[in-house]
Amino acid sequence: MANKHSIELQGQTEDEPIKDPAQRDVDKSAMSFTAILGLQDELNLQGEDYSWASSIYYFGYLAASYVAALLLVHFPVGKMISTSIIVWGVVLMLMATAFNDKGLIAVRFFLGATEAAIAPGLGIVVSMWYKRSEQPFRHGIWFQGITIAGIFGGLLAYGIGHVESIAPWKAVFLIFGAITIVWSFVLFYWLPDTPTNARFLSEEDRYKAIRRVQENMTGIKSNEFKLQQFIEALLDLKCWALVLIQLTCSIPNGGVSNFGSIIIEGFGFSTLNTLLVQIITYVIQGLLVYLSTAGCSWFENSRTWWMVWNAGLSIVGAAMARQISPNNVWARFFGYCLANAYSVNFPLTLAMSTGNIGGFTKKTTVNAMIFIGYCTGNIIGPHLFFDDEAPSYPSGFLAMLICFGITFCIPIGLRFYLIWENRRRDRLDQGNIGDSIEDLNAALLDKTDKELLHFRYVY
């Protein structure tokens, strides 16, 4: 008898929880919050110091990406994610001990390294539990951790800004880090490594959980590293298209995520009011995440169109924030909010990867490639926001507009490529997708999308 957490195979519905590690996203907000709460002044950050402190995080992430990809193949995914978050929380608290730019940069490097396994690991979790039609919305659920962290983090930072017994920027890192550690222990206990060892499911329901994702044809976790799959990932054009989308979204992100508070304060808001007003940007981001990821489930093969939509909104928003008169504070702020629509393409890119990549080694390799693009963009981004142009940063917004234009075009090309590939497979397969026992069993084997002729791409 199925329990209350059961999965009904026949009805194709599921109630198993996604244990969203929302608290690991507080650092994304913490650095921006502390920028206007005394961090730059107390540590005497001059010129490019703050930009390098922002970028170095992603050098650590980049350095650890390959190792993280290997560890995700060889070790339980759930334990890897939760352990990484525990260490992350500890390192985040250590940021409060920095007393100059060198100390801040050193701690930020290791903080970035601890993140390398988390988002790729969550991508693997989604691919193991959900059908391809369900994946965009599920990626959107865990991505909402950034929205939640931004909203509640902003409220916390506002309250912390009134603290006098300790430097507010130090209190932000200590409190946010402690919250992260507490949540990580919840994850360690509840987040399953695969459907086969989910403690909240019966044996019957575990079997159903596996059978319901057979049609994905992307397999279940394998602990074997396969060189052939690794090479296939490097030679696959669609994989590089996803990397380029991630890169062109991450360059703006590198600036916005670290200079956001400075930009908004520059519109004309006070320091503490900036922390409150910034919450609006996260609310709008959350609504756009819901609209886009749910829309992918409502409308079949609409993922690339939603990516184009988000890039278009970002182009309009960045142009408004850059070009509208400084006297029109709220119009510029609304433009800034729209400019953040690019971030919604992050879960959509992961959904395109998990839904279109078969083979566990290939899947983890492509995830690593995407996150290398993510790191590279976030390293570049802060250095396009020049200190002598603060707080309006016209060059930074121009760079954002160029990136958004590229992001607008790539999904269109990728869409037509995948349509062409599906039609080519239809011709080779005589238009019939097999449903024999052999085909169903092959769907659970560690085979790549190119090895399975019956595999059809989603776009």
Image (spheres, rainbow, N blue to C red):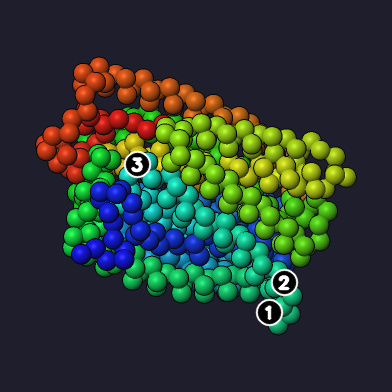
Quarter occupied by the N terminus: bottom left
**Mark 3 vs 1, N-terminal side:** 3
Q: Residue at position x 77%, y 55% from top?
A: 265
| Camera-nearest label, 2 or 3 | 3
The residue under label 3 is 132
Residue pictured at 18% horizontal, 63% vertical: 203
Q: As shown in the figure, which amino acid type bears the numbered disc 2?
A: Gly
| SS for callout 2 | loop
- Check disc 2 and report the residue beneath it: 161
Task: Check disc 3: other Cα within 10 Å, few if <14, some if 14-19, many if 20+.
Answer: many
Q: Give the CA separation, mark 2 to mark 3.
A: 44 Å
- Crowding near the residue tagged with mark 1, few <14, some 14–19, many ≥20 C-alpha atoms within 10 Å: few
Instruction: Using the rendered view, name the quadrant where residue 396 is placed.
Output: top right
What residue sits right under mark 1 in the picture? 166
Q: CA distance from mark 3 to mark 1?
A: 49 Å
The numbered mark, 2 or 3, whose residue comes first in the sequence reads: 3
Res 389 label: none
Name the residue type under label 3.
Answer: Arg
| Eye-nearest disc, 3 or 1 | 3
Dot 1: what SS?
loop
Residue at 66% over, 52% down: 281
Q: Position of residue 298 (x, y in %)?
A: 46, 39
Report if the CB atoms under discs 2 and 3 are less than 8 Å apart: no
Q: Which of the 4 image quarters holds residue 360?
A: top left
Residue 157 vertical position relative to residue 224 in the rendered view, above or below: below
Query: Is residue 161 something that shows in the picture?
Result: yes
Instruction: List x then y, in percent, for residue 123.
Output: 38, 49
Residue shown at 58%/74% (left/top)? 175
